[in-house]
Image (cartoon, rainbow, N blue to C red):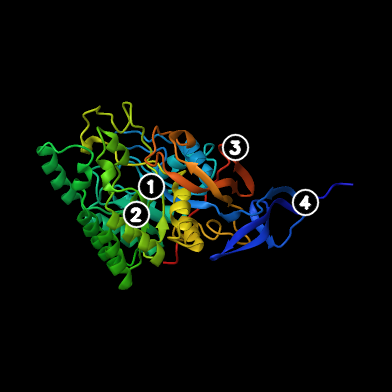
Amino acid sequence: MIAQRPRFDLVVREGLVAIGDATMRVDLGIRDGRIQAIAERIEDATQIVDAKGRLVLPGGVDAHCHLDQPNYGAACADGFRSGTLSAACGGTTTIVPFAMAYASDPLAKTVAAYRLKAEGQALIDYAIHPTIQAASAQTLERDLPDLIRGGYASLKIFTTYDDFRLGDSEILAILKVAAAHGALVMVHAENDAIIAMLKQDLVSRGLVAPRFHAKARPPIAESEAIHRIASFAELTGAEVLIVHVSSRVGLEEVTRARARGVSIHAETCPQYLLLTEADLDRDGLEGAKFMCSPPLRTTDDQEALWTGLVEGSVAIYSSDHSPYRLAGPDGKLRYGPQSRFDQIANGMPGLELRQPLLFSEGYLKGRISLAQFIALSSTNAAERHGIAPQKGSIAIGGDGDLVIWDQERETTVTRDLLHDNTDHTPYEGMRIRGWPVTTIARGEVIVDDGRVLGVAGRGRFVPSKARKA
């Protein structure tokens, strides 16, 4: 007699599953990588994971992180292997990084080559954002429409940086194509001319320490660019996401545009909620650890962003994981101990701590509700980037991406705790309450109480679906 296969491959037993702001003690049954049952009691499983007394939440979706990409100077310290390991250990089960190359390279070729980098390396599932650095006829008429139809329906553009920025006419052309084909356009929005003028003035006066990075990129550089992008989105009918919103005035531009019906959303990141520009003013070049763009702001800006998380004007919470080592010929300080602020690579690591920081500082401190935590760190990103309902929520038919949280565990952040490939963390010494102790991806336990059980290469590409145009 042939033994029958158990009904479920894995059951998560007696966890406190979030239903809105309430929790319900239920079992979750997973078969063939998908959630197939939510019930008071589920038997007949190959594997049972005991979650009694602990929160069971959707796996995190980090739709803004940088892995294995060229950066015209400092090298990205994390590839897909170390980056996705770090993500999984922090409760993230899906990432969406950026396919970037030289502007002269065909966009379709760039995306295909980047996807090959992930295959065989990624521990968790991933979608991919094409990054557009040149609005050529081939990009606008062939590559971009084909990519959107082929599962790459969220893309990114820049209004600053010499190697990435696009002019207004190029941005308008891209937004027009995106609107016609139902793609989301992510925008790094800072006014390049303002930054160039202020940077030149500061450097000419010898004001080159890391703290002057914030002076070279003031909030008005962000708010002006957001206003312009919102106007372009209104004109073309495109849907846009302003990434890493850092300031009160920047968020106000998003809010005003939304009030008049523009399809525009705001994203922010942990560094803008928990660190300030005072961190740039540290001894020597310690401030280099805290350099990102846009730069860190004030406590007033922090409060505006926290309010935005509560009120919904900030829709998505991402890491903007930009991993650089400090030392070495391709690190942040590749120009040595006398590096000027304009020679230091901008970016912070944050993939692993993204969810624990918001859980501790947001949910457990009462700043946001449990439902808001889930929406900000999982559901909203999955929806906006076209990978819901497969990702981002606990629902019948969705992927079995789950994280079990110990709300009482207290952890002090140290560099040795983390799994990325950088040599520092801007959150060193911070005390965090609550921790993702078990990460389950498509029904497979890949991290359990600090032990990594999943293998590199198990992650799969997830197509990003276009919206109805």
As measured in the structure, the alpha-carbon distance from the residue carrying label 4 to the one carrying label 1 is 41 Å
| Residue at the spot 30% in from the left edge and 64% down from the top edge | 254
Q: Quadrant of residue 200?
A: top left
Q: Helix, strand, or loop for circle 4?
A: loop
Q: Amino acid at mark 1?
A: Asp
Task: Specify the amino acid type for callout 3.
Answer: Arg
Do the residues bearing badges 2 and 1 touch, measured as CB atoms within 8 Å?
yes
Q: Earlier in the sequence, mark 4 or mark 1?
A: 4
Q: Secondary structure at mark 2?
A: loop
The answer to the question of whether label 2 and label 3 lie on touching residues, with beta carbons closer than 8 A, is no
Mark 4 = which residue?
A: 6
Mark nearer the viewer, 1 or 3: 3
Tag of residue 243: 2
Mark 1 vs mark 3, CA separation in Å: 26 Å
The residue type indicated by label 4 comes to Pro
Residue 100, percent across and down?
36, 43
Which circle, 3 or 4, is nearer the viewer?
Answer: 3
Residue tagged 1: 320
Find the residue positioned furthest to the bottom.
260
Whether label 4 touches label 2, CB < 8 Å: no
Q: Earlier in the sequence, mark 1 or mark 3?
A: 1
How far apart are the alpha carbons under marks 2 and 1?
9 Å
Left or right of residue 174, residue 442 in this image: right
The mark nearer the N terminus, 2 or 1, is 2
